[in-house]
Amino acid sequence: MPYFLMLLMLVIASPVESMNREQVVLLHGLARTSLSMEDLATILAREGYQVWNIDYPSRKYPIPELAKIVREEVSLKTAGAESIHFITHSLGGIVLRYLQKHDPLPNIGRVVMLSPPNQGSEVVDVLRDTWPFEFINGPAGRQLGTDAKSTPRSLGRVNFETGVITGDRSINWINSLIIPGDDDGKVSVERARVEGMVDFHVVHVSHPFIMKDKNVIANCLHFLREGRFDTDLPERPPP
């Protein structure tokens, strides 16, 4: 076969091959960037997934506006995909829940939420009206309280295949004095739960670092493949 024809076939085949791979969208947490999810993105790509590690301006807009931004970005990047999986951290999970309630993606696959404030956080109840909190966390942060009018509490049960991993280790003792029960420094273990989830797993990891934990990464992969977590997985990512 002539060399130029071989090159042409490669160029034509590459987009099709890419779209046939399973798609995974990563959504970072509040006041973070896509860099915080880069370790996870690298391992997912190594395992054969097409990965979209999305940046969104988490400190700039309230949750409804963030959901619109994410919806447009996901639709653009994953156009034609049969199924789209998600792995989210913290606020990213609430943005996805809001999106799926108000403008749902029809082809959503499995979802792993890491340390999500699914029932809000007492830290927000106490600190949201202070200047430092608002400066650091923006309007979306103020919507993450535990009262009935908070955005997470208004979203109801999830209607997509969801597993939640949360931590019970805190490196923020001030926040932990505010939060009742076990917590990860931002969210209590109990408030990470959401009605409709299919699995729940607690790890001894703090909120800011859960997405980098080796056991967590291994369980993210396991859930995408099997639809459940495996508490017996070794604490290391796949080779």
Image (cartoon, helix red, strand yellow):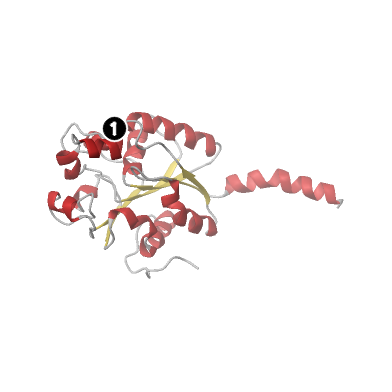
Q: Position of residue 127 (x, y in %)?
A: 17, 40
Q: Is residue 78 left or right of residue 5?
A: left
Name the residue: 37% across, 61% down.
213
Q: Nearer the viewer, residue 132 or 102?
A: 132
> Count of labels shown?
1
**Compared to 28, does 227 lie above or below?**
below
Name the residue: 35% across, 31% down.
61
Q: Position of residue 208 (x, y in %)?
A: 32, 53
Name the residue: 17% across, 57% down.
182
Give the secondary structure at mark 1: helix
Q: Nearer the viewer, residue 59 or 7?
A: 59
Q: Position of residue 230 (x, y in %)?
A: 35, 64
Q: Amino acid at mark 1?
A: Pro
Callout 1: 10 Å neighbours few (<14), some, many (20+)? some
Q: Position of residue 191 (x, y in %)?
A: 20, 47
Asked if residue 152 can be seen in this view, the reply is no
**Compared to 229, does 116 lie above or below?**
above
Asked if residue 108 can be seen in this view, the reply is yes
Task: Read off the residue under disc 1.
Answer: 139
**Compared to 56, does 190 lie above or below?**
below
Q: Nearer the viewer, residue 33 or 1?
A: 33
**Compared to 83, does 206 lie above or below?**
below
Based on the displayed image, in which of its 4 quarters is residue 64 positioned? top left
Based on the displayed image, in which of its 4 quarters is residue 56 positioned? top left
Name the residue: 32% across, 42% down.
91
Based on the displayed image, in which of its 4 quarters is residue 229 positioned? bottom left
